[in-house]
Image: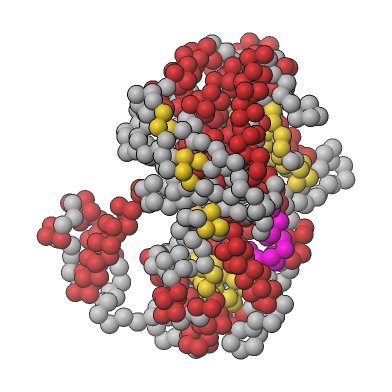
């Protein structure tokens, strides 16, 4: 709870913690809230504690717009060896004696366990925590030097140490007047150079100044990319499709995404589109991503077969830094929109990766509001005291649930269909970031990290997997509700509107998980004894509730940044590198070997043998696959498409689309 001045209303012990951290944090990061002038920023010293307990200091990293930091080079002791971690382990025993049914009767506790910032309201009273728990969690954050790590990220330090890269997706939504340095250079002007180029190009396409090869306006856009080049932009697109202001800007236009290398995805993405009115955006930083480039070559063939080779320059653009390969592909390098190695794929939606296709669909002005919403949370994350900081608080709750309460998963449950693609995006942001078993220093971790993220919009999920979260495994849940719906339906004779009906479930499900239903209550309702075990709900299942005033470009940006920074908080506390993804590499390497073998065997009509170096199971699977394929030898290749996509002698019969 907050007074009108924003002060904490906490018990004495919590208030002391709040006061002690607030002065330190406000002094260290106040400059980030204001437009940055030519004056030098005050220094902030980030210390690192060695395993022997001594403090070491490394080389200074200077940035303007955020405080200076110092990074030590020695490996730190694991966070699990700290007194703060051990205090939480002991505290867990006390929490295990409590039940949310009783905790939720404490009005003062419920009042304390809420937070609000710029319209985003969060109630975490249904988490298995007390004021004491939160004090101990914030102390753990201090022990992990969370504030120093946040500062280091905003300062452009190479905190992605395995790839020696800065982590500055926040710079992609920074206002023009901010100064964020990487290797001594302010990168914000570079960001806005690309954004201005996106604005100019998208305006020309949308107003018909940029036309296709046959002189027709380009009203359809297909974005070709995978992973972070797909999931983030798709999440934002799905969120805005039924937003009134955004939908007005998208009238008469289509945006589709092609990610999977499966030809089914190609067929569905291109079905019904006219090459004459279609613009293709190929998103690949290096222009070498195997799946993306195969899909790009496929779509290029689709365009060429209808419009000729020269049409590629008018109908295909790129988001890439490899201008040589862009040009070799046939795309004019002037129509390439760059981004930087300090923007990780899963954090790239605010860069040209998302901003180009989304601006083509909705207009740059709408998407600039999206950037403003994200930056609003960025500033809050960088400067707010821990106990008032939404991403920090949510991140520490996830650390508590995962590493102390042994909850392996989290359900993301938006009670709005517009956020249907939030959970898939956060799956990548969270699981690719924190799905690690070693610390940033390479030490094996003796505690659980990461979460298995999944989810569906309410009320669809209630008729799918809620059975398990009510009476099976304990899975903490994020309930996300919208106060003002993007659409309004109210039928005469109904006691509530359609959106009210949806939100009634939003409120009820969280209480059902927390409170449950006892055998005593069931007997009072004359439930037969034989059914009581089946109808008993244990309750005590944690959740939190987030409410947004409405869902528009600005609040979608806020929500995105909250989840991005929440994930970073978890990784910072656990001591992970949340910004690399070596776990995705091995499968790519092995696929390359399979690809070579596949080509050889299909060209020669042979089977895979033990001599090809695969284990017996894989050999058997490969041979079963090869035996079931139509004979298509790669030594005499032809272009094969469904006939409804390309009209040629080699096409296959058209398929039925749903």
Magenta-drawn segment: 358-374
Callout count: 0
From the viewer's perspective, tell me whether residue 501 is left or right of residue 306.
right
Residue 432 percent coordinates (x, y): 44, 46
Quarter where residue 388 is shown: top right
Compared to residue 630, the image places residue 19 above or below, namely above
Render colour scheme: secondary structure
Residue at (43%, 52%) from the top-left corner?
Answer: 165
Residue at image location 60% in from the left, 36% down from the top: 28
523 on left or right of 616: right
In the image, residue 14 sits, relative to residue 388, either above or below, namely above
Q: Examine the structure image and report whether residue 125 is included in the region drawn in magenta.
A: no
* Residue at the outermost left position: 611
Q: Is residue 310 visible?
A: yes
Residue 417 visible (yes or no): no
Q: Position of residue 211 (x, y in %)?
A: 64, 83
Residue lying at 59% horizontally and 16% vertically, measured from the top left = 132
Q: Where in the figure is residue 484, as x and y percent of width and height? A: 78, 45
Quadrant holding the C terminus: bottom right
Between residue 597 and residue 461, name the one nearer to us.
597
- Tell me the quarter of the picture where residue 456 sits: top right
Locate the N terminus and report the quarter of the image it occupies. Answer: top right
Say above or below: 248 vs 140: below
Question: In the image, is residue 362 part of the stretch drawn in magenta?
Answer: yes
Q: Name the magenta segment's main secondary structure.
A: helix
Image position, residue 105 (x, y; %)? 70, 15
Looking at the image, which residue is at 62% across and 80% down? 277
Residue lying farthest to the right in this orientation: 492
Residue found at the very far front of the displayed protein: 39
In this rendering, position of residue 60 left or right of residue 122: left
């Amino acid at each position: 709870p907050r007074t009108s001045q924003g002060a904490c209303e906490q018990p004495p012990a919590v208030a002391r913690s709040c006061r002690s951290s607030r002065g330190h944090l406000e002094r260290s990061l106040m400059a980030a809230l204001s437009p940055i002038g030519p004056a030098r920023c005050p220094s902030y010293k980030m210390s690192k504690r060695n395993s022997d307990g001594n403090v070491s200091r490394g080389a200074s990293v200077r940035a303007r717009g955020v405080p200076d930091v110092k990074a030590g080079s020695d490996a730190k002791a694991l966070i699990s060896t700290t007194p703060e971690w051990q205090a939480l382990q002991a505290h867990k025993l006390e929490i295990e004696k409590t039940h949310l049914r009783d905790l939720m009767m404490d009005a003062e506790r419920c009042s304390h366990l809420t937070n609000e910032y710029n319209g985003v309201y969060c109630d975490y009273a249904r988490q298995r925590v007390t004021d004491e728990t939160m004090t101990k969690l914030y102390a753990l954050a201090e022990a992990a030097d969370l504030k120093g790590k946040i500062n280091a990220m905003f300062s452009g330090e190479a905190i992605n140490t395995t790839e020696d890269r800065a982590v500055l997706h926040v710079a992609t939504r920074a206002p023009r007047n901010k100064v964020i340095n990487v290797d001594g250079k302010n990168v914000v002007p570079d960001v806005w150079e690309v954004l201005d180029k996106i604005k100019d190009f998208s305006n020309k396409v949308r107003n018909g100044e940029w036309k296709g090869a046959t002189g027709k306006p380009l009203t359809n856009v297909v974005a070709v990319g995978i992973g972070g080049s797909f999931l983030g932009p798709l999440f934002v697109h799905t969120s805005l499709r039924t937003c009134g202001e955004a939908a007005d800007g998208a009238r008469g236009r289509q945006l589709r995404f092609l990610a999977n290398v499966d030809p089914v995805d190609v067929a569905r993405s291109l079905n019904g589109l006219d090459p004459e009115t279609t613009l293709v955006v190929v998103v690949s930083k290096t222009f070498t991503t195997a799946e993306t480039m195969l899909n790009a070559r496929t779509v290029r063939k689709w365009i060429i077969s209808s419009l000729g080779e020269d049409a590629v320059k008018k109908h295909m653009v790129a988001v890439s830094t490899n201008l040589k390969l862009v040009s070799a592909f046939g795309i004019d390098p002037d129509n390439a929109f760059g981004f930087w190695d300090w923007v990780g794929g899963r954090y790239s939606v605010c860069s040209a990766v998302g901003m180009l296709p989304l601006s083509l669909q909705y207009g740059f002005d709408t998407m600039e509001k999206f950037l403003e919403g994200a930056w609003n949370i960025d500033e809050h994350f960088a400067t707010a005291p821990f106990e008032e900081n939404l991403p920090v608080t949510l991140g520490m709750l996830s650390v508590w649930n995962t590493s102390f309460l042994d909850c392996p998963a989290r359900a993301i449950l938006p009670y709005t269909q517009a956020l249907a693609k939030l959970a898939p995006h956060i799956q990548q942001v969270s699981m690719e970031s924190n799905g690690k078993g070693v610390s940033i220093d390479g030490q094996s971790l003796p505690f659980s990290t990461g979460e298995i993220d999944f989810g569906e919009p309410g009320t669809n999920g209630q008729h799918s997997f809620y059975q398990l979260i009510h009476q099976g495994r304990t899975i903490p849940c994020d309930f996300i509700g919208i106060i003002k719906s993007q659409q309004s339906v109210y039928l005469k004779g109904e006691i509530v509107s359609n959106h009210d009906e949806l939100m009634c479930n939003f409120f009820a499900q969280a209480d059902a998980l927390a409170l449950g239903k006892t055998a005593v209550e069931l007997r009072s309702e004359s439930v037969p004894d034989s059914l009581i075990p089946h109808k008993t709900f244990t309750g005590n299942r944690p959740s939190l509730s987030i409410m947004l005033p409405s869902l528009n470009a600005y609040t979608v940006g806020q929500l995105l940044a909250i989840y991005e920074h929440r994930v970073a908080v978890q990784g910072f506390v656990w001591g992970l590198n949340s910004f690399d993804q070596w776990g995705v590499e091995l499968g790519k390497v092995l696929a390359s070997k399979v690809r070579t073998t596949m080509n050889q065997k299909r060209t020669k009509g042979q089977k895979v043998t033990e001599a090809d170096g695969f284990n017996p199971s894989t050999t058997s699977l490969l041979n079963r696959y090869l035996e079931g394929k139509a004979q298509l030898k790669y030594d005499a290749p032809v272009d094969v498409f469904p006939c409804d996509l390309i009209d040629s002698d080699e096409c296959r019969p058209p398929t039925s689309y749903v």
